[in-house]
Image (cartoon, rainbow, N blue to C red):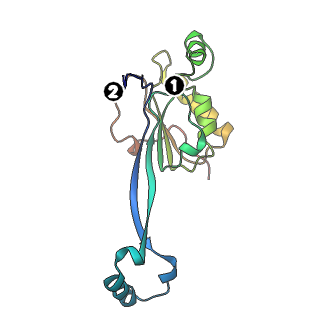
Amino acid sequence: MAPDGNRTKSLGYQILRKKRKLRTEFSGLSGKQIATLRMEKGNDYVTESSLEVVLSYSGDTPVFDGPHWRSGILIHEATFIDNQGEAAAASQNRGGRHSVLEAVIHRAASAPLDALILTHFSVRYKVDAIDEKIRHLCIDANVPYPVYRIPPGETVRDILSLPPVFVPHT
């Protein structure tokens, strides 16, 4: 429960990187000229800051729309690998408290990601069935980046050092 008494159903997180870069109007200046401007007018005059989303985590939630997924890496739950079965239907009838793999992959396929990490699979699925479904859906959706998965009931450290389940053909 939230402090105000309302229920918090799910939380997602984003990790941001603040970057400073030279303003375009000063790109033709020498390093010495830029340093002089910086001394005279300050760093904010010479550079501009921007925020870059480097990692997004969906939490235990239904599928977000694509605009939320502008990050380097997205970690998203995919409890159900298909819409079949009572548990998937019950979840969808209660407002979609869990995601279905197909919806996650199809929505994420056009997002500007460097990688997708899928997690929170139901223990009812075998790892081989999950991997096969991921590969099939990624090919179908023309996913342009690698896709990793954390098997149900396992903890994985440094997942990006492991081979992805899906690698796009270049």
Q: Where is mark 1, residue-wise? A: 128
Depicted 143 relative to depicted 44: above or below: above
Report x, y in % for residue 151.
43, 27
Q: Closer to the camera, 47 or 156?
A: 47
Query: Could you say which quadrant of the image residue 38 lies in?
Result: bottom left
Q: How crowded is mark 2: few (under 14 residues within 10 Å), some or many (20 or more)?
A: few
In front: label 2 or label 1:
2
Residue plotted at (43% across, 51% down): 54
Query: Could you say which quadrant of the image residue 106 lies in?
Result: top right
Q: Closer to the camera, 143 or 47?
A: 47
Looking at the rendered structure, the kind of residue marked 2 is Pro
Q: Where is mark 2, residue-wise? A: 3
Report x, y in % for residue 11.
42, 32
Residue plotted at (45% across, 43% down): 56
Q: Is residue 43 visible?
A: yes
Report x, y in % for residue 157.
33, 38
The CA distance from mark 2 to mark 1 is 42 Å
Please report whichever mark, 2 or 1, sits nearer to the chain's N-terminal start. Answer: 2
Report x, y in % for residue 41.
36, 82
Label 2 residue SS: loop
Looking at the rendered structure, the kind of residue marked 1 is Asp
